[in-house]
Image (spheres, helix red, strand yellow):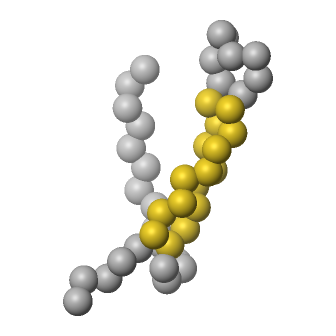
Amino acid sequence: MEPIVAYVLVERPGGFSIGYTIRADNLPEPIEKQLNVVLETEQ
């Protein structure tokens, strides 16, 4: 599988979450997870 690149425009200060689902023939059911991204400002 080729890598996937996504550009996300952030409209919330502090961070955001990305939900994703993994489906495969050898999995009994899809795996649903969430990636939490925390933004930090440089000082």
Q: Quadrant of the C terminus?
A: bottom left
Residue at 76% from the left image edge and 16% from the top image edge: 28
**Residue 40 spot, x, y in % from top left:** 36, 77
Q: Is residue 20 left or right of residue 29?
A: left
Against 5, is 22 above or below?
Answer: above
Residue at 76% from the left image edge and 23% from the top image edge: 29
**Residue 26 spot, x, y in % from top left:** 65, 10
**Residue 8 spot, x, y in % from top left:** 46, 61
Residue at 54% from the left image edge and 79% from the top image edge: 12
Looking at the image, the residue that sits furthest to the bottom is: 43
3 and 42: which is toward the camera:
42
Instruction: Name which quarter of the figure residue 27 lies in.
Output: top right
Q: Is residue 21 left or right of residue 36?
A: right
**Residue 9 spot, x, y in % from top left:** 46, 68
Against 33, is 41 above or below?
Answer: below
Against 30, is 16 above or below?
Answer: below
Q: Quadrant of the N terminus?
A: top left
Residue at 38% from the left image edge and 25% from the top image edge: 2
Looking at the image, the residue that sits furthest to the left is: 43
